Image (cartoon, coloured by chain):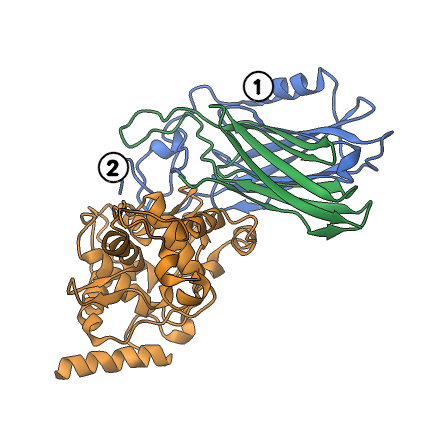
Chain colours: A orange, B green, C blue
Amino acid sequence: MRRRAAAALLLCAGLAGSAAAQGLPAAQRQSGFESMSPSTQAMQRDDDANPGMLSVRDGEARWVRPDGAAGRACADCHGDARVSMRGVATSHPRWDATLGEAVGLSRRIALCRERHQRAPRGAPEGVERLSLSAFVAHASRGLPVRPDPDVRLDPVRERGRRLFERRMGQLDLSCADCHDARWGRRLGGATIPQGHANGYPLYRLEWQALGSLQRRLRNCMAGVRAEPWPADAPEWVELEAFLQVRGAGLPLETPAVRP
Amino acid sequence: MTTGALVRVPPRARRGEVVEITAMAAHPMETGLRPGADGRLVARNIVHTFTCRYDGAEVFRAELHPAVTANPYFAFTTVATRSGPLEFRWEDERGEVIVATATIVVE
Amino acid sequence: MTPPPPGPRRGALRSIVSIASLALLPPAGATPATLSAAIAAFTGGVAPTEGGMRLEVPELVENGNSVPLRVSVDSPMTEAAHVRRIAVFNEKNPQPQVAVFRLGPRSGVARVGTRMRMADSQRIVAVAELSDGSFRQHAVDVIVTLAACIETEGGG
């Protein structure tokens, strides 16, 4: 009970924007957008040049298309996504009472498809999940990341924080070693960003495609020569839950563009 | 695969005005040089031609090679002559075609 | 959409501590010789004159998979004097051609933008064909840096 209260206090301190134990002090937080070259920033800002917008448009079409054995569209229950989905992406992951687990936005969409459309949930990097995630998250574009205060998420976030600080891989580096301690410095020709997750799914120039946070985190782990966790491992949502608190207050940029 | 295209044409213009147009289509522009998950090279398939037709004529054409980035993007100009549709067309090496239309009102 | 074309360089294992080195050379890539040949094929042997046009590319490119560029040519774009075609070439990609754009008096101005792939830091050349049969050209040297922490073939 006392630990829970302490964790809740820390979380509130982070949300309130004062210096917190949850990663970098709020005043220091900056989006990876700031580390990019002007031309890549321009590509993100211009909805006619941002390839992620092709996925948002695709998601918009899927939103109104009946699907699955139930023959229902997302819009049948959720109406106009610009209204109903506003503030949803910024407050995920959330606690799913049925599963007894934290669930991120992409998995939430998959569960919805399975439970209410009776459609296949789809692969995480498949076009249905990515396009719908991009479309739903886009409805929150510009809003600040705002972690859900549900205390059942606290232990998840704490495990995520420990993962963030754990050394891993042949290079024996933790996320914090680069993204807390050395952000702003150069790694080869690239500037090390703070490593926030405020633009997902995003268009990574390296992929020439839209991809999920999990895909990007796999790339991080490849960078330190670590074995990535299996696709359905709980670590992914734990890390995502911590990253959300660590990036609280940053504007959502989906679909972001990154190198 | 995401399909479709995004085009931007100003909704209105004065006759004789030079207008800026952008067009971006969803296409991987596979070079044929990239190994897939199974280690074998993914077959080449690129958009080889992009055209824009407006007021009875082709006003822009691009012939592309694999060095053009995935989800190819073009920015070009045309003179506003008459109200009507601008038709955009991308054709790839498998014969697949993506089309998009936008309308301009010319005063 | 699909992952990027690695080209021979990207086959190398990369750790974040070392700066990437050229592990393999392109098997039959473009060279200065094939670049010149490609330009000559475009102009039909006519030698382009330098200038009268601009080729804008970012000074430093964060990822060679997507390099924005814009070509503009000084021309009144009238029926009597206009740009017919603009071609873009490169020095070190597997092939020297990038794209050929067809313009005309209905273009209003001679200005085209697109995004290209660059396998390495290299020279980009734009060549414009004018309606009087002459050609102009302009070249830019572009530096391409590599993104950190990228996918490996194992799907990491």
Q: Closest to the observer: C9 or A75?
A: A75
* Numbered label attached to residue C52: none
The reply to whether residue A196 is visible in this rendering is no
> Going by the image, does C47 lie left or right of A68?
right
Residue farthest toward the right in the current orientation of the protein: C80
Q: Closest to the observer: B82 or A48?
A: B82
Report the residue at 26% width, 56% height from top: A116
- Residue carrying label 1: C34
> Going by the image, does A162 lie left or right of C54?
left
Q: Alpha carbon of mark 1 to alpha carbon of mark 2: how far?
A: 35 Å
- Residue carrying label 2: C154
Q: Chain of mark 1?
A: C
Q: Which residue type does callout 2 highlight?
A: Gly
Name the spot of residue A223 as percent of width and height, x first: 30, 47
Q: Regarding mark 2 in the picture, which secondary structure is present there?
A: loop
Q: Which of the marked residues, 1 or 2, is nearer the chain's N terminus?
A: 1
Q: Quadrant of residue A182?
A: bottom left
Q: Quadrant of residue A105?
A: bottom left
Quadrant in which the N terminus of chain A is drawn: bottom left
Residue farthest toward the left in the current orientation of the protein: A1
Q: Which residue type does callout 1 highlight?
A: Thr
The reply to whether residue B45 is visible in this rendering is yes
Asked if the residue at tag 2 contacts the one at tag 1, i.e. Cβ–Cβ closer than 8 Å, the answer is: no
**Mark whose residue sits in front, 1 or 2:** 2
Name the spot of residue C125 as percent of width and height, x first: 64, 31
Report the residue at 59% width, 33% height from top: B89
Q: Is residue C84 above or below residue A43?
A: above
